[in-house]
Image (tube, rainbow, N blue to C red):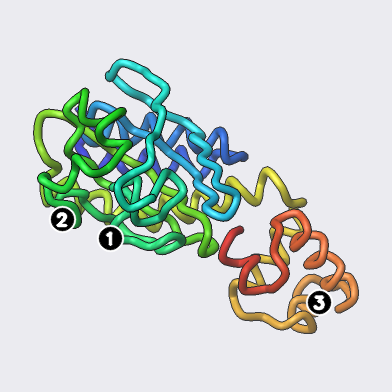
Amino acid sequence: MATMLERACRLIDDLGQTSSPEEYARVVVDGIWELVPNDETTFHDIDLDARRTHVLSTRSMLPQMDPVVEPSDDGSDLSDAHGGFPYRRGLGPGEPGVIRMSDVVLRREMERFPLHRQAMGPFGIDNAVKVSFASPPAICRAVIVARTDRDFTDRECDLLTLLAPHLEAAYRRARSAGLLTSREREVLSLVRQGLTNREIAHRLGITSGTVRSHLEHAFAKLGVGTRTAAVAVS
């Protein structure tokens, strides 16, 4: 039987073969599901500015229902980064890291969250860990692992912390693979290494103007306007 470390390494390898955010989401959810005992694993991408929650993939043993989110006492809702959704506490939008919900939300506080009352509490979901990816400030991109019977251990959280940078790097590659040409990905990879347009042109045997053109096309596809932003989301 494969050890936990062997399964974690296999997950990293499998994620490296994905070529789109949707394929990545399926692989990461299935991989975490097998790696850490849980009742529900979800990979979501939340755009706070657009007030849009996109669940890319989920795997669950729990009854499925469509939550109707009522306003909370303080007026927060699903699009509030620190209000209506307890999973979002402890790490701000776009901030990478791993956080256990019980470390940032007291159990007696749970009942004030509309989502908990309607879609978590009825199934006893008081325990969760969030693996959050670096993203633009208005984006909450994360894997959420939840279970009903017990909290997540320090060992499980440590494993997810070790995995987190690999999961994030694999997501960037999958996202780029689904949007960018091979040359655009190559140029951005060199930008990530700190090379200037002139240095990239020399490395690839092309002109600086061609490098600039590749970057402009990549920026448009990624929805960004700067080199720093392109590296952050690709």
Quarter holding residue 168: bottom left
**Disc 2 element:** helix
Give x and y (percent) for residue 39: 24, 26
- Left of 90 or right of it: where is 186? right
The answer to which image quadrant residue 29 occupies is top left
Amino acid type indicated by mark 2: Asp
Amino acid carrying label 1: it is: Gly
201 relative to 93, above or below: below
User: How busy is the neighbourhood of tag 2: few (under 14 within 10 Å), some, or many (20 plus)?
Assistant: few
Q: From the top left corner, tell me how far across and down residue 194 is, in percent.
A: 61, 80
Q: Earlier in the sequence, mark 3 or mark 1?
A: 1
Residue occupying image coordinates x 54% and y 63% = 136
Q: Which numbered disc, 3 or 1, marks the residue closer to the eye? A: 1
Mark 3 and mark 2 lie on one chain; the one further toward the N terminus is: 2
Considering only vertical position in the picture, is 52 above or below 206?
above
Query: Tags 2 and 1 in contact by the CB under 8 Å rule?
Result: yes
Whether residue 232 sits left or right of residue 27 in the image: it is right
Q: Quadrant of the N terminus?
A: top left
Residue that mark 3 sits on: 201
Instruction: Mark 2 or mark 1: name the one nearer the start of the chain.
Output: 1
Question: Which of 167 and 65 lies nearest the eye of the viewer?
Answer: 65
Q: Secondary structure at mark 3?
A: helix
Which residue is found at the position 18% from the left and 39% from the top?
Answer: 127
Residue position for label 2 = 103
